[in-house]
């Protein structure tokens, strides 16, 4: 299969005015300047002067867990009965027939990170999935791809308002430390030849403590961002920051940590005090200070199908155009540690490719063809 006849943007710094991409068995086999391509083998799709790009990726969503067009029946976002639930798995709650999946595909989003909400200090295992399929097991790229954690207002409001712990940021950080310490003691006992009683929570946290699984830590305010960095350093765990609304105030520390903060949602308004500093300028300011960023709609907080609109608005407010493309392709893949599979046009990667009528940051552009793992889904 070959796509040709359009401007090819790889999301890895290469662009070809008259580009092409070949793929077979769901994997990219060749790409580049069409004038230098070997004769096409098999079907050819003509981009007709549009844009050929990797499928877009949202680095943090609740698609399929918090279904659109439903009430509580389709909301499995938060198990708000225990602030520490690392043993929960997002894949056990994702409904592949959520109408949001079709909306996402129609707007060029081919994959996303899906996870529990932020009511709990430790919410559970997140999954990286493709946006098309009727069986979640077949849609998984990596599960778990991250461990969801949360600081700030959400755990406080969920439990504190019900006279339960945590009621303060101090208690939230304490609960996180206690859970990680308990898991470390459990892990050390197992590795020294002991046989501790099975503990599902501790088992789930062992890959985090070993550095095998990254933590995605929900933080809006700068003080919560700094607490997340402090606790992560105490236990030597790998992490990134989700939302980072006050990321500009913690830019020095984020840069030193070497993380890719996931900014957003940027389309929704400020719905609570800790998002008072929400700004379309945040991503651009961080990028200008040498920090690579990813973007999120936090679906359904913001509609997942408007991921490209979010990126375009950030460009309007100062984010570099190429950085904006990376923010919803390769950087989003890196934040979930699946960039070996998706996020750019490269030989050997999954054939997640979208053909746009115009540049996808143009308001009038449409995704005219969408391929996921080499299969046309639009």
Image (spheres, rainbow, N blue to C red):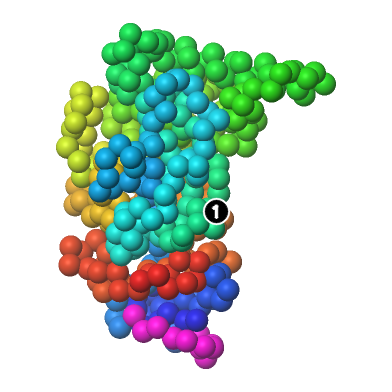
Residue linked to disc 1: 137
Q: Position of residue 23 (x, y in %)?
A: 53, 75
- Residue 78 appears in the picture as rendered: yes
Q: How many marks?
A: 1
Asked whether, in this view, residue 202 is left or right of residue 255, the answer is right
* Majority SS type along the magenta span: loop
Asked if the stretch drawn in magenta spans residue 220, the answer is no
Q: Residues within 10 Å of mark 1 (few under 14, many from 20)?
A: few
- Residue 14 appears in the picture as rendered: no
The quarter of the image holding the C terminus is bottom left
Residue at 27%, 45% (x, y): give it. Answer: 70
Asked whether, in this view, residue 232 is left or right of residue 185, the answer is left
In front: 324, or 237? 237
Residue at 58%, 25% (x, y): give it. Answer: 201
Name the residue at the bottom extreme: 39
Q: Position of residue 56 (x, y in %)?
A: 38, 58
Asked if the stretch drawn in magenta spans residue 46, the answer is yes
Among the 4 quarters of the image, the one containing residue 219? top left
Q: Secondary structure at mark 1?
A: helix
Residue at 18%, 62% (x, y): give it. Answer: 363
Name the residue at the right extreme: 193
In front: 286, or 297? 297
Instruction: Magenta stretch: give its range.
Output: 37-47
> Does residue 168 lie above or below 329 as drawn?
above
Q: Position of residue 69 (x, y in %)?
A: 25, 48
Asked whether, in this view, residue 314 is left or right of residue 214, the answer is left
In front: 81, or 243? 81
> Does residue 271 lie above or below 188 as drawn?
below
In front: 129, or 37? 129
Residue at 47%, 12% (x, y): give it. Answer: 174
> Does residue 341 lie above or below 250 as drawn?
below
């Amino acid at each position: 299969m070959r796509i040709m006849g359009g401007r090819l943007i790889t999301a890895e710094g290469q662009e070809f005015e008259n580009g092409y991409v070949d793929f077979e068995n769901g994997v990219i086999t060749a790409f580049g300047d069409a004038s230098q391509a070997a004769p096409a083998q098999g079907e050819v799709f003509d981009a007709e002067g549009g844009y050929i790009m990797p499928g877009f990726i949202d680095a943090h969503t609740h698609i399929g867990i918090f279904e659109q067009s439903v009430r509580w029946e389709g909301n499995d976002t938060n198990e708000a009965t225990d602030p520490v639930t690392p043993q929960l798995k997002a894949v056990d709650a994702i409904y592949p027939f959520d109408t949001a999946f079709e909306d996402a595909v129609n707007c060029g989003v081919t994959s996303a990170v899906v996870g529990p909400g932020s009511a709990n200090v430790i919410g559970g295992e997140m999954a990286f999935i493709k946006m098309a399929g009727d069986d979640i097991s077949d849609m998984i790229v990596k599960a778990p791809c991250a461990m969801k954690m949360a600081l700030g207002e959400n755990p406080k409001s969920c439990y504190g308002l019900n006279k339960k712990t945590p009621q303060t940021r101090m208690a939230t950080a304490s609960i996180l430390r206690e859970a990680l310490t308990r898991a470390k003691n459990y892990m050390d006992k197992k590795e020294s030849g002991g046989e501790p009683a099975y503990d599902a929570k501790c088992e789930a946290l062992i890959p985090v403590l070993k550095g095998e699984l990254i933590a995605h830590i929900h933080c809006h305010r700068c003080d919560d961002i700094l607490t997340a960095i402090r606790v992560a350093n105490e236990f030597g765990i790998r992490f990134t920051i989700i939302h980072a609304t006050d990321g500009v105030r913690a830019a020095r520390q984020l840069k030193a940590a070497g993380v890719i903060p996931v900014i957003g949602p940027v389309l929704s308004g400020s719905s609570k005090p800790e998002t008072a500093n929400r700004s379309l300028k945040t991503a651009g300011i961080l990028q200008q200070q040498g920090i690579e960023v990813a973007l999120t709609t936090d679906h359904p907080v913001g509609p997942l199908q408007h991921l490209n609109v979010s990126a375009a608005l950030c460009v309007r407010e100062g984010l570099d155009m190429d950085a904006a493309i990376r923010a919803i392709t390769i950087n989003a893949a890196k934040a979930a540690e699946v960039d070996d599979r998706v996020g750019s046009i490269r030989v050997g990667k999954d054939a997640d490719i979208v053909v746009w009528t115009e540049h996808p940051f143009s308001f009038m552009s449409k995704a005219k063809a969408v391929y996921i793992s080499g299969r046309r889904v639009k």
